[in-house]
Image (spheres, rainbow, N blue to C red):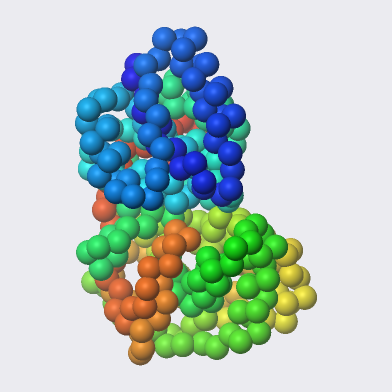
Amino acid sequence: MKLFFIVNPISGGVDKEPFLKKAKKLCDFYGIEFMIFKTTGKNDEEEVLRSIEAFKPDKIASVGGDGTTLFSATALLNSPYPMGIIPLGSANGMARELFVNSTPIEALKDIIMSEIIEGLDMILINNKHYTMHIGDVGINANIVDAYEKDKNRGMATYAKYFMEELKRLKPFKVTVKTKDTTVTANVFMAAICNARKYGTGVLLNDRGNLMDGKFEIVLVEKINISSLLKAGLSAFKDEFYDSQSSQVISTNKAEIIFEEPRLLQLDGEVIGYYKNIKLEVQESAVKFITHRGNTHLTE
């Protein structure tokens, strides 16, 4: 077997070297040929594809957090190379969503041993960007934007901006068009969901399945602001979902229209301001290494 590691050395502020040391020992012990590619932020997609084509691995391990997972998946779109996830970021929301073992070396063993490979859906945004987890416009996008500009990281920093954003929260008008329906609503957030939960653990879309050829647009129309302000950090639980009133639209293609340009974030990265957002699912676009414990396989 030949194994290729895509490693983001700085994701989540987590040191990857202890894991890589264990991984090298494991591979050497079982005679697995391997190559390690570390991202630098410069021409990473071009360089990783060149390295993969030269090495021709049997499997690829994405080592990092949600951003690394998205980078790896985007690079491998419609390629023959299957990938698995080693959760070594700050939130690891995608890893949890896909039932990846939370212990990195055990996740690596699953990648090596498993022959269960399934297609993961991606969502194409305005024919340019991709998301595989959750994107949104509104309260959370504004929080992510402020969080990215802060030198401090972690849940406490995120919570600080969460509370500040709640205090100045105002609804805005949105129209969603699909081939079957047109919905207009005043919302606090319009979310693009391929998955169910944010990396913080907040449940947003209980219909989410990254393997069903669909995505959901969740229109959050009501938020119990007073209860969330009182809850503080404890708001980052499934109870947040219970305190909101939402419309959920399942589809494989849609357009979201705002009255004025609004800030969009995708998988934790701020993309920019948009008045129109066109969405289309890319079904089974990435080959994913998983196991029978992944309940998405049976949904």
Q: Is residue 249 in view from this perspective?
A: no
Residue shown at 42%/77% (left/top)?
263
Residue shown at 52%/28% (left/top)?
20
Work out which residue is located at the far right of the displayed protein and give it. 230
Q: Is residue 265 above or below residue 200?
A: below
Quarter-wise, where is residue 82 in the image?
top left
Q: How many marks?
A: 0
Coordinates of residue 297 in the picture (x, y in percent): 42, 39
Residue shown at 72%/82% (left/top)?
226
Q: Is residue 29 in view from this perspective?
A: yes
Quarter-wise, where is residue 223 in the image?
bottom right
Residue shown at 50%/71% (left/top)?
145
In which quadrant is the C terminus drawn?
top left
Between residues 253 and 189, which one lies in front from this camera angle? 189
Q: Is residue 104 above or below residue 14?
A: above
Coordinates of residue 84 in the picture (x, y in percent): 42, 34
In which quadrant is the N terminus drawn?
top left
Q: Is residue 262 above or below residue 196?
A: below
Q: Is residue 87 above or below residue 227?
A: above
Between residues 166 and 10, which one lies in front from this camera angle? 10
Coordinates of residue 16 in the picture (x, y in percent): 55, 36
Coordinates of residue 267 in the picture (x, y in percent): 44, 59
